Image: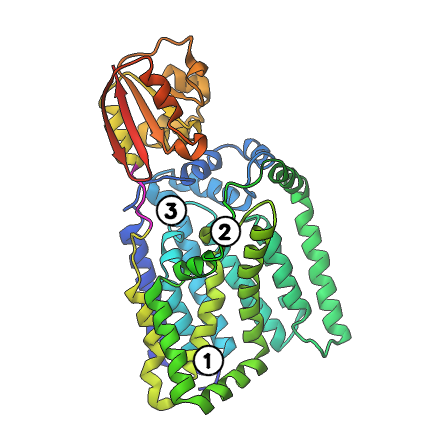
Amino acid sequence: MQNGEFTQKQKYILYGLIMIKLLLGVLFINRLCIDLDEPFSIFHAQKSLTEMNALFFSENNPPLHFWLLHFWIKFFGISPVSVRSLSLLYSLLTIPVLFNLGKILKNSTVGLLLVGLFVFSNFHHSFGLEARTYSLLSLLFSLSLLLLVKSVEHKSWKNSVLFAVVLGLIFYTHYMALLIVPMLFLAFLFSNFPKVSKSDFLHTALVFVLLITLALPLLLPLMARLQHVQDVGTWVPKPQWSELYGVFNKLMNGPGFILVLVAVVLFLIIRQKEFFVALIQTLNKNRKLVLVALCSLGLYFSAFVISKIGNNSVFLDRYLFFVNIGFFALLAWLVDGLKPKFGAWRFVLLVAVIFGFNPLKTHNRESDKLVAYAKQFGGSVVISPPYYDLTFVYHWDQNLFEAGHEKNALFQHEVYPIYDINDIAVIQLKKPIVLVDADSKFVFGEQKIKNQLLQKFTMRESRTFLGNYEVVVFD
């Protein structure tokens, strides 16, 4: 099959995959409650642009997702379906990008396989629905890979400008851009190596100048965040060597996929040795695919090395899940190369991914149930650690959440986010006292506030919730 061929049957398959992605999104968009970092994004995105922009000097978040969510909220509100539908839209837009990426790498079949692997990826499903920046990052990374492989075929000024703009947008989306953008730029630089013409040099210079120009407005917030990370580090622990496999295992939907992949490779080596050697030789000549594979592998291993030998770790599945797009592209190309008599086996890796697909894989949250339980007692609510207050108030009182509450406003509603019981020592708490412990051991190494309250009050009852959360009621 030639690159340009796209049969009617394949068109229906592509439309079907888009509908499956949409259906999965609609069915599960509200199955998990708003939690973790989502309330932070929603809370600040609903503020004015002036208030919001001041945030980026003190928080580890570039502004693009917040800006887009800000205007989305103005039209659709802050309900779970409203704020998550924007992320679902990013995921749906990623599908035609991936199809065209696979089509340029080889043919329409590779494009369809790549889309199928994306649709049934646990990470792209779960993060593709959360009101955070990750779905947008996947879209931009996919688009950058598409523009990169197009530049290998033919460098055009339009494509080079678009490539620079997309790299700039990645800088405004997530600070993993400090790894992503240099890797993609180097791939663009060497896309025609060793035959580098004057035109190639001019295109690279254009991309560099545009990228620097676009990134300049973000320079001051970026420097402030780098200084902060240098002073206090990141919350991500240093990775163990076993995590090189462990994170990859998660990105590929679990051990079932890895076993099938190993079986396919062994089959090719044992039963189709000459064909396998020819396939590897073909891969070596496919500069476009090599660049996509090297970008993804380079990002994966460089994040590990930097985290292992440096003072600050970034080797975390949610920070790296987008790189599996490159892995999926390589594997789709590999299985499409099977001899015609093994044509049906082209879909074996897709079947393995579907087998490991779990749309509720990240079901580790139930703040809605926690808040409902705490609410029934009345009295004063003490929250530890205090940064859980945004999640708590989102489910407690959305009017208060939308009002852009401050600490004093929460105190008036008998809600006290604190680090230490001495923070509210002069306040007469209304009984019963309800402690919401949102995994405070992660911050303090112990349930600090609970121990302090136990010294002064009698515990009436308690209940635990997913995520190592606990609600304790004191008389």
Disc 3 and disc 1: Cα gap in Å?
33 Å
Q: Is residue 363 located in the magenta-colored stretch of the structure?
A: yes
Above or below, 29 against 324 in this view is above
| Magenta span | 362-366
Residue at position x 54%, y 68% in the image = 146
322 on left or right of 152: left
Above or below, 186 against 240 in this view is below
**Quarter that holds the N terminus:** bottom left
Q: Is residue 470 located in the magenta-colored stretch of the structure?
A: no
Question: Which one is earlier in the sequence, the residue at label 1 or at label 2?
Answer: 1
One can see residue 165 in this view:
no
In the rendered image, residue 271, in percent from the top left (x then y), is placed at 38, 89
Secondary structure at badge 2 equals loop
Rendered image quadrant of residue 397? top left
Rendered image quadrant of residue 437? top left
One can see residue 193 in this view:
yes
Q: Which residue is mark 3?
A: 84
Do the residues under discs 3 and 1 have CB atoms within 8 angstroms? no
The amino acid on which the numbered mark 1 sits, given as a three-letter code, is Asn
Is residue 50 or residue 414 the one in the foreground? Answer: 414
Crowding at dot 1, Cα within 10 Å, few <14 / some 14-19 / many 20+, comes out as: many
Residue at position x 42%, y 26% in the image = 403
Q: Which residue is mark 2?
A: 239
The amino acid on which the numbered mark 2 sits, given as a three-letter code, is Pro
Do the residues under discs 3 and 2 have CB atoms within 8 angstroms? no
Residue 107 got which mark? 1
The amino acid on which the numbered mark 3 sits, given as a three-letter code, is Arg
Above or below, 282 against 164 in this view is below
Is residue 39 or residue 247 the one in the foreground? Answer: 247
